[in-house]
Image: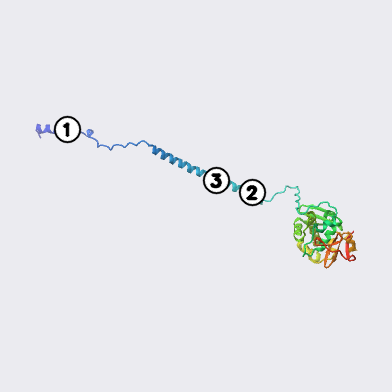
Amino acid sequence: MNIPPRLSNTSTDYLAHTPSADTQRLAPQAPMLRQAPPTLSDAQNSASTTTARGAENADMDTALNSIMDALSSLLGNIKQLVAQLSPKKTEPNTPAPIPANPRYEPHTAKPYSQTALVDGFRQQRGTMNCVTVAGIKAAMQRFGGPNEIYSSVQKTPDGYDISMRDNPNRIFHVTNEEIDEATQKSGFTGNNEKMLKEANFMYAVSAKRAQFENNDGRASESFSAALATLDSWEHTHEGLYRLGLKNYVEQTSAIDLANGAPGVMASDNHVYTVLNGRKDDYGTLGYRPAPWDSALKLR
């Protein structure tokens, strides 16, 4: 079909003015926002935040150190406790050390004077152990302390071995605990500490011999039972015999004791020594005994 030239030119002109795809405009884009520069206030806030975090970290370090110190101290205490509770090992072939008894240590002594014996140690009123008390005082007046009264006194790891004059081959063993018990139950008091310790020691040894001999038919039950038999009715001579001095005892009269002989006598259901010519009345001087009353003396 023939197109008229006019129409053909018009179409050509239109196409010539139609923009191509490559020349089409793009849609306008939103402008990009620029970040404002940091201000002084922002810097201060940032510094404050950093400082706060640093303080928190320091507090945490301090708390952690405190916890570690506490744990270290607790561990040290536990180690000490375990060491105390653990049994101590003794090296083989090494003898155990002999503990010192704070209540008695044997010393060489000379006979005590009558004046010193009055209240150096004394019986407690209300007790019934006068036979043993009188025997010990008479022996101290005659010989001195335990080292002189007994045949021998030997320290052992837990106490003492004692042999007596009437049978040196027989050993009586008394422990430190038994000496403590005898000291508590004797009731002795006095103003001479050395004499008081010696008297309590000999009281314990007397109880040990009473236990060995089954005094009153019941002393062999225990050391405590033997102590109880000393605090009861007894014969005048028994205190001297339990000290091993049987072979030194002689029958005499009160006038002999009043003149200074060491010994014991009895009257009014009480056994006592005679010191400075007078009856030993629980640590004080009483009346003069009747001259011809029966007595026992140590030769």
* Local secondary structure at mark 3: helix
Mark 3 crowd level (few <14, some 14–19, many ≥20, 10 Å Cα) = few
Q: Residue at x 22, y 33 (%)?
A: 23
Q: Which residue is the site of mark 3?
A: 66
**Residue 133 placement: quadrant:** bottom right
Point out the frontmost of discs 3 and 1.
Answer: 3
Q: Which residue occupies the extreme bottom position in the image?
A: 268
Residue 50, given in percent of the width and then of the height, sits at 44, 40
Q: Which residue is mark 2?
A: 80
The answer, for residue 73, to whether it is visible in the render is yes
Along the polypeptide, which appears first: circle 3 or circle 1?
1
Foreground pick, 64 / 104:
104
**Nearer to us in this view, 203 or 214:** 203
Please provide percent x and percent y for residue 139: 85, 58
Horizontal arrangement in the rendering, residue 293 relative to residue 41 (left or right): right
Q: Nearer the viewer, residue 257 or 60?
A: 257
User: Which quarter of the rendering shows the C terminus?
Assistant: bottom right
Q: Which residue is mark 1?
A: 17
Residue at 14% of width from left, 32% of height from top? 13
Q: Which is in the foreground here, disc 2 or disc 3?
A: 3
Q: Nearer the viewer, residue 208 or 237?
A: 237
Residue 52 at x, y percent in the picture? 45, 42
Whole-angstrom CA distance, mark 2 to mark 3, is: 21 Å
Give the secondary structure at mark 2.
helix
Mark 2 or 3 closer to N-term?
3
Q: In front: mark 1 or mark 2?
A: 2
Q: Amino acid at mark 3?
A: Ser
